[in-house]
Amino acid sequence: MAYQEINEIFQQHDSGTNSAEAHGIATAMLCVDARANANTWLEQLFEDDVDLLEEDKAALLTLFERTRLLLNPDETEFRFDLLLPDNDDLQEHVIALSDWCQGFLWGIGYSHSAADWSGETNGILKDMVEITKIDQDVDEENDEDEEAFIQLHEYLRAAVLIIRDELSQQNSTTH
């Protein structure tokens, strides 16, 4: 799924959301409940009066369902990734990473009570809050900035799976 293709859908409808933030919301909803409804996600992203073209709705639903598939605990390969720009612009990547975290935090808060979070999950969510405040003015030529971005990106990929595993265990003991 191409970041820019999804982003254009949000821009066409003046959504105020971008691809990274929307993917963060979807990921969080699916971490809380692997059976989360894609239409509920769409309702959170767009005003009631927005008429999505069928191909736009299909692209968004495909993104949601692909995310569900990649978060499946039975998946033997670690293929889940954050939806970030598919270019080499480090500053755009950093902004999208911050937006993705903002979306994830919103999605977790929308879908799950904080009362049940472990210390590890709390720590991860606090880290995400800090990432939303990250200095977005980066030096494209600075290898340290590039390396820091790569490390944050990999940390978040792994953190999502930790949160998913914890919340799925909690859900299985309460159902």
Image (cartoon, grey):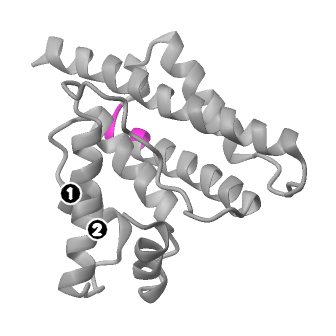
Label 1: state its secondary structure.
Answer: helix
Range of residues picked out in magenta: 108-112
Mark 2: amino acid = Leu
In this rendered view, identify the residue nearer to me: 89 or 95: 89
- Left or right of residue 38: residue 142: right
Q: Which numbered tag is attached to residue 29?
A: none
Mark 1: amino acid = Ala
Instruction: Specify whether residue 174 is painted magenta.
Output: no
Could you say where residue 2 lies in the image, as x and y percent from the top left?
42, 67
In this rendered view, identify the residue nearer to me: 65 or 44: 65
Could you say where residue 136 lies in the image, as x and y percent from the top left?
80, 55
In this view, 6 is above or below 95: below
Q: Which numbered tag is attached to residue 38?
A: 1
> Furthest-left residue in view?
175
Query: In which quadrant of the rendered image does the C terminus lie?
Result: top left
Mark 2 highlights which residue?
60
Q: Indicate which label's residue lies in the foreground, 2 or 1.
A: 2
Q: Are marks 2 and 1 in contact (CB under 8 Å)?
A: yes
Q: In the figure, residue 42 lies in which quadrant?
A: bottom left
Residue at (57, 33) in percent of width and height:
154
Residue at (56, 63) in percent of width and height:
85
Could you say where residue 62 lies in the image, as x and y percent from the top left?
23, 62
